[in-house]
Amino acid sequence: MYKLVYGKACHLPVKLERKAWWALKEMNFDIDAAGETRFLQMSELEELRMEAYESSRIYKDQTKKWHDAKIVDKKINMGDLVLLFNSKVKVFPGKLCYRWSGPIKVIYISPYGAFELWSKEGGSFKVNDQRV
């Protein structure tokens, strides 16, 4: 066991080595059989670990599939009127305010999800697609 853990042979003092040999002989303990049993136990542990990894991967795949099914694609074209989400509005700033402002016209849609919008008050500005 010591060699399995530390990678080198264990050198005990003669007194302890004699007592250990006597204990092994007394119990009729076969070192080779014990080594084989330990090897099988470690192999089983490796199989259990691999099953756990596989179960985790399957769970993550199913969770991703469920999440992706809940996402609704936005079909927004240039020239459409949209509402803009104002994330800076406090929940209770003293008055109840709307978190959405608009309608605002879409001027340009970038390939990576950014929108260029135009409003009468602020002119043109760019926002992320999550705020539209």
Image: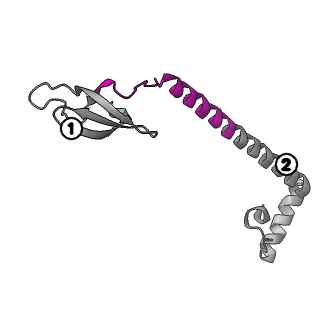
**Taking 53 as reference, is 103 above or below it?**
above
Amino acid tagged 1: Gly
Please state, as top left, top right, bottom left or bottom right, where the N terminus lies in the image: bottom right
Amino acid tagged 2: Thr
Instruction: Report x, y in % for residue 72.
Output: 46, 23
- What is the count of numbered marks? 2
Q: Quadrant of residue 80?
A: top left
Instruction: Report x, y in % for residue 16.
Output: 78, 71
Q: Main secondary structure of the magenta part?
A: helix
- As drawn, the residue found furthest toward the bottom would be 13
**Taking 50 as reference, is 98 above or below it?**
above
Magenta residue span: 53-82
Residue at figure coordinates x 54%, y 25% from the top left = 66
How packed mark 2 is, by other alpha carbons closer than 10 Å (few <14, some 14-19, many 20 or more), is: few
Instruction: Report x, y in % for residue 116.
Output: 32, 37
Residue 129 falls left or right of residue 70: left
**Taking 35 as reference, is 59 above or below it?**
above
Q: Quadrant of residue 47?
A: top right
Closer mark to the observer between disc 2 and disc 1 = 1
Q: CA distance from mark 2 to mark 1?
A: 77 Å
- As drawn, the residue found furthest toward the left would be 94
Q: Could you say whether the residue bearing mark 1 is in a helix, strand or loop?
A: strand
Residue 106 falls left or right of residue 119: right
* Magenta segment includes 7: no
| Residue highlighted by disc 2 | 37
Residue 69 falls left or right of residue 51: left
Residue 93 shows in the view: yes
| Residue highlighted by disc 1 | 123
How packed mark 1 is, by other alpha carbons closer than 10 Å (few <14, some 14-19, many 20 or more), is: few
